[in-house]
């Protein structure tokens, strides 16, 4: 079997810069040489599963492509994991690829890879481990066809081109970050590897130094950027052609602010899962009328909404979001999770509805929907309105059992900012919400917290709050 992603790498202009890592410029030729070294190194390893400590550098990306050529399965471990052995010990058929091998590989003999034909046929490309918002890690197995076609369809929507310079801000152990690398290989553009927005000086330095035209990040990164340098980013409105966002929800207010700051930029936000990457896309600038939504189904994807009885919902009726298409994973691996389908459609566990224009509105995870007096309530709807209040930066809503009246009610955790009044805030929040949502959706309890607990890619960890 030919690996199309690898063939695209081989066909790129060898002298063009592919990656910039810590100011080190790596051409497509240099990267192919590194991939060839790792290919020769891993070719001597009999193990089928190569567990990669997915630090953000050229070695990890080259190991990924070397695995594809060999017919081995790349299995990504988050570099922040405190116990990588808990991953590579999931099978006896594993080899651990870590930073301890980098120096050895730099001097390893190689024969330059000149074709994309697999050594051993294997339709499966990689394993991405995900927990979603809760639970134990689960391995999501993806095929070569899925990762290639998904990257192709992402580029089709975002219009990435070979002249673009991308500031890549996410981990590559996650679906979003890894897919951006695949998109760059297909288009032959340049990617600057960065570790998030923790250092804004470095971000703006690279934005200017490399004349970056594309930024890929999660909403938490944008939130940080807007809070600390909202006025400065607008200076780059003519330079930044495209931003891709994903992995967690973003408030309508944040979307509008970003669009107003960068009116010439195509800000493209996706909805998807590791199991069904980039299922929808929304362009804030071109589809502003539907900015509350998560967009329309992407190329190669078909979305339907089913009710609890398994029947397709009418337009604008809420139900479970179900997906079929070329972006779907193959199966779960190294875990007890079972795939759930309604016919050909993968049951995502997410709730939402599609309007008459075909736009999908995400309401929350099925297991996060609140059951209040028999009514299904989306915590995202409540949080959206709470976050509109001037003195609140962020909020999270969960249900709790009120032992005094025996009822299930809603509790809101709120992060206050400098505008917060000295007096109690509960009455002000409740009075505001009365104008926005139904009475049964209004929280009965409010708790101030310093920070909302989140995963590395910005997903709210509601279970951590439920445990308190």
Image (spheres, helix red, strand yellow):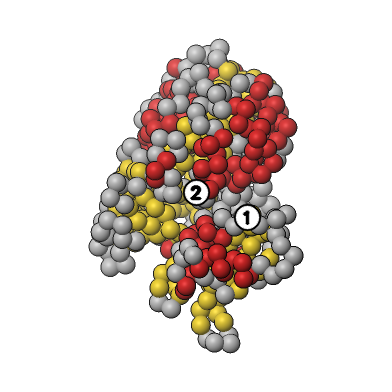
At horizontal 62% and vertical 71% (from top left) the residue drawn is 427
Dividing the picture into quadrants, the one containing residue 417 is bottom right
| Residue positioned 56% across, 68% down in the render | 431
Secondary structure beneath dot 1 equals loop
Which residue is at the front of the view, 406 or 446? 446
Residue at screen point 50% across, 13% down:
13
Q: Nearer the viewer, mark 1 or mark 2?
A: 1
Q: Is residue 257 left or right of residue 372?
A: right
- Residue 155 at x, y percent in the picture: 42, 30
Q: Position of residue 130 (x, y in %)?
A: 52, 52
Q: Which residue is mark 1?
A: 390
Residue 164 to residue 426: above or below: above
Closest to the observer, 377 or 91: 377
Residue at 56% across, 28% down? 237
- What residue sits right under mark 2 in the picture? 252
Earlier sequence position, callout 1 versus callout 2: 2
Front one among 258 and 190: 258
Neighbour tally class for label 2: few under 14, some 14-19, many 20 plus, Cα within 10 Å: some
Quarter holding the C terminus is bottom right
> Would residue 143 be found to the left or right of residue 247 on screen?
left
**Neighbours of disc 1 within 10 Å: few (<14), some (14-19), many (20+):** few
> Where does the image place residue 445, in percent across and percent down from the top left?
60, 73
Q: Is residue 49 above or below residue 331?
A: above
Can you give x and y, in whole percent of width and height, for residue 154 in the image?
41, 34
Marks 1/2: CA distance?
15 Å
The local secondary structure at tag 2 comes to helix
Q: Nearer the viewer, residue 22 or 307?
A: 307
Residue 64 visible, this orientation? no
253 horizontally vs 346: left or right? right
In the figure, is residue 68 to the left or right of 343? right
Residue 423 in view: yes
């Amino acid at each position: 079997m030919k690996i199309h992603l690898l063939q695209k790498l081989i066909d790129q202009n060898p002298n063009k810069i592919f990656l910039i890592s810590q100011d080190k410029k790596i051409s497509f030729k240099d990267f192919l040489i590194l991939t060839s070294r790792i290919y020769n190194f891993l070719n001597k390893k009999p193990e089928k599963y190569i567990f990669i400590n997915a630090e953000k550098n050229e070695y990890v990306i080259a190991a990924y492509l070397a695995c594809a050529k060999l017919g081995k399965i790349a299995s990504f471990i988050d570099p922040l994991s405190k116990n990588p052995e808990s991953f590579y010990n999931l099978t006896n058929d594993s080899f651990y690829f870590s930073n301890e091998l980098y120096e050895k590989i730099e001097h390893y003999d190689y024969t330059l890879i000149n074709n994309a034909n697999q050594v051993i046929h294997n339709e499966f490309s990689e394993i991405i481990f995900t927990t979603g918002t809760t639970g134990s890690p689960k391995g999501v197995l993806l095929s070569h066809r899925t990762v290639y076609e998904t990257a192709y369809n992402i580029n089709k929507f975002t219009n990435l081109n070979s002249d673009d310079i991308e500031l890549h801000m996410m981990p590559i152990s996650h679906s979003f970050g890894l897919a951006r690398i695949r998109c760059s290989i297909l288009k032959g553009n340049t990617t600057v590897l960065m570790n998030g927005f923790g250092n804004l000086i470095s971000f703006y330095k690279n934005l200017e130094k490399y004349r970056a035209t594309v930024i890929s990040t999660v909403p938490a990164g944008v939130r940080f950027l807007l809070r600390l340098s909202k006025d400065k980013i607008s200076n780059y409105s003519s330079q930044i052609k495209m931003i891709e966002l994903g992995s967690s929800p973003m408030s309508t207010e944040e979307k509008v602010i970003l669009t107003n700051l960068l009116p010439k930029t195509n800000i493209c936000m996706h909805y998807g899962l590791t199991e069904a990457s980039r299922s929808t896309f929304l362009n804030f600038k071109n589809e502003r009328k539907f900015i509350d939504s998560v967009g329309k189904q992407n190329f190669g994807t078909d979305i339907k909404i089913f009710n609890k009885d398994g029947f397709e919902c009418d337009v604008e009726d809420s139900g479970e979001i179900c997906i079929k298409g070329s972006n779907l994973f193959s199966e779960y691996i190294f875990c007890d999770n079972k795939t759930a389908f309604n016919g050909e459609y993968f049951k995502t566990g997410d709730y939402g509805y599609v309007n008459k224009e075909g736009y999908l509105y995400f309401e929350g995870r099925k297991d996060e929907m609140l059951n209040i007096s028999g009514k299904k309530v989306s915590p995202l709807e409540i949080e959206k309105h709470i976050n509109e209040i001037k003195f609140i930066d962020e909020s999270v809503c969960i249900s709790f059992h009120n032992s005094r009246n025996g009822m299930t009610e809603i509790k809101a955790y709120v992060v206050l900012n400098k505008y917060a009044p000295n007096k109690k805030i509960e009455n002000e929040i409740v009075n505001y919400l009365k104008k926005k949502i139904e009475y049964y959706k209004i929280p009965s309890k409010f708790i101030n917290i310093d920070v909302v607990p989140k995963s590395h890619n910005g997903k709210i960890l509601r279970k951590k709050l439920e445990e308190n």
